[in-house]
Image: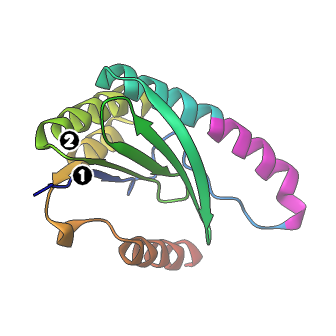
Amino acid sequence: MLKHFYVTLLDLPEALPFAFMPSGKFEEMESDAKNEEAAEKKLLAFTIQLMQNFGEDYAYIGEDVIGEKFYRRFLLEKNGFFEIMTGIPAVVSAHFTTQDRAQKFAEALKKTITTQVKEDKAKLVLNQSVEVSEDEESKLTFEKWEKLRDIRSGVEEK
């Protein structure tokens, strides 16, 4: 039986350098475009460093836009893949067939967070949020992400 292990990280402190959400306002289109370009460069730097820490090559396999969520997907050299959702809150999710590889990726992700995130408290929160799991029930689902986004939006409006 093939097993599935995954690593998840939800950027609750909104500290990952590549997280970006366009304003959606016409008058801010130019500013959004500049911010998106900067976020793309930061995402590239993040993934390059992550793969250096993981010790493996990767290939960019594409992107999806689903609703307001922007997914970037990457295939790992030996086996497995990861995806990064760049909306706010950002999400990193990686999938493997062995727990050892999932654990190795989690450690590489923590090391990358430590060097890429500037705020010490955010580094601590993010590193403690990196999870390795086999249980599908604890997986960060689209529905859970939507609830978190709704909660965030409600707080932001007050």
**Residue at 54% over, 43% down:** 61
Q: Is residue 27 magenta?
A: yes
**Location of mark 2 (residue):** 102
How far apart in space, not on screen, are marks 1 and 2 (Cα)? Answer: 6 Å
Query: Which one is nearer the viewer's eye here, 91 or 34?
Result: 91
Assess disc 1: are there few (<14), some (14-19) or many (≥20) residues with their C-alpha within 10 Å of its C-alpha: many
**Location of mark 1 (residue):** 6
Q: Is residue 35 left or right of residue 1?
A: right
- At label 1, the amino acid type is Tyr
Query: Which one is nearer the viewer's eye here, 71 or 89?
Result: 71
Query: Which one is nearer the viewer's eye here, 26 or 98?
Result: 98
Q: Is residue 72 magenta?
A: no
Q: Locate residue 31, reporting x and y percent.
A: 81, 49
Q: In the rendered structure, which segment of residues is drawn in magenta?
A: 26-40
Query: Residue 57, can we see it?
Result: yes
Q: Locate residue 149, reporting x and y percent.
A: 48, 72
Check the image and report above or below for 156 versus 14. Answer: below
Q: How many marks?
A: 2
> In what element is the residue under mark 1?
strand
Residue 99 found in image quarter: top left
- At label 2, the amino acid type is Ala
First-in-chain label (1 vs 2): 1
Q: Quadrant of the N terminus?
A: bottom left
**Residue at 64% over, 38% down:** 40
**Residue at 14% over, 55% down:** 3
Q: Locate residue 59, reporting x and y percent.
A: 50, 32
Give the overall secondary structure of the magenta segment: helix
Indicate how the structure is coloured in the image.
Answer: rainbow
Check the image and report above or below for 143 versus 71. Answer: below
Whether residues under marks 1 and 2 lie with C-beta atoms below 8 angstroms apart, the answer is: yes
